[in-house]
Image (cartoon, rainbow, N blue to C red):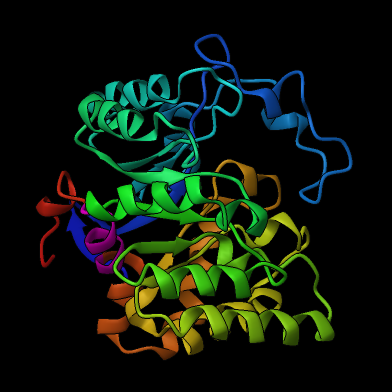
Amino acid sequence: MLFLEMRGRMLTRYFVDTHVHFWNLALMYYDWLTDKYIENDIIGDYHSISSRDYLPADFEREVPPDHRPLVVHLECALGHKDPVDETKWIASLAVKNDWIGALVGRGDLRDTRFEELLERHMSASNLFRGIRMFSGPDVWTTSGFKNGLRLLRDRKLILDLEADADTLPQAAEMAGVYDDLRIILEHAGFPKQRTVEYFHRWRKAIKCFAAHPNVACKISGLGMVDHGWSENSIRPWVEECFECFGAERCMFGSNWPVDSLYSSYAALVKACTNITKVLSEADQQKFFYQNAVDYYSICNGAADVKGA
């Protein structure tokens, strides 16, 4: 169950959305939205979101008036020279939009100046919680990347990780070696096919990764591959995440506005609410609220929610 509160005559739902993006095309360089648009990408044609800014006001228009999510912003200014510029910009947005509760920045863990970058991210905003770096096993095994993992661990920061059925076994090895580093898996392990054979392969990989207690899972982004998704089509993937990670290590995420290509925000929240109704009320609150607050150390806005 989401946190509920009567506001006037309206029953308002409070929850945390752990995966939201904002962008300003005039302010920063987003290669994937502009001159490096990805044709024939797995997520389909995303021209409708690439040609315009996506700002907090746009997000608020898509969220139903009885939904009040706190959000975690994930970096998306790929190609921009200095990742800290994005952190500073999101921090400025959070001043006027206190429902932005945390942010994850960009950085290359292999960079010899990665420690300096972390310090600049942390100085730029008290909402900074960790790093996302698109990479794979060939990078994860390098000495530079391993040093970056230690720097994150020593500062109690998060690694937001993208991995799939093919790379989760190697991600599991990483999690085992750095067992005091918090790693949050994005997009439920990004299942890239919807066949029975693939489901079993993905499930095996998820179980391997989830065996490590220092990892958690965002159930997000399932529409990127399942463009005509329904509550029933995503149910097995959601349920398997709960089976493997437990309610204590699963979090709700929308991947907005990318997943807005294939859904309304209300439909996504409703589907996840319906699927998780089999859980106890306490476990539903963990999934929609408390786990995200704990992992991302969300303290502004969330603290004002009654019953939190």
Give how far across and how far down residue 213 sits, in percent: 35, 80
Does 257 appear in magenta?
no
Residue at the extreme top:
26
Please tell me in which quadrant of the rendered image residue 124 appears. top left
- 66 lies left or right of 76: left
Give how far across and how far down residue 168 sits, in percent: 61, 71
Q: Residue at x 57, y 58 (%)?
A: 141
Quadrant placement of the C terminus:
bottom left
Give the main secondary structure, helix, strand or loop, of the magenta stretch.
Answer: helix
Q: Residue at x 58, y 41 (%)?
A: 257
Quadrant placement of the N terminus:
bottom left
In magenta, the rendered stretch is 290-297
In this view of the protein, which residue sits in the foreground, 19 or 6?
Answer: 19
Q: Residue at x 16, y 44 (%)?
A: 300
Q: Residue at x 72, y 70 (%)?
A: 166
Give how far across and how far down residue 39 sits, in percent: 87, 36
- 250 lies left or right of 296: right
- 16 lies left or right of 260: left
Compared with 61, 229 (above or below) is below
Does 291 appear in magenta?
yes
Compared with 235, 110 (above or below) is above
Please tell me in which quadrant of the rendered image residue 45 appears. top right
In this view of the protein, which residue sits in the foreground, 289 or 173?
Answer: 173
Please tell me in which quadrant of the rendered image residue 245 appears. bottom left
How many discs appear?
Answer: 0
Residue at the extreme right:
40
Residue 191 appears in the figure: yes
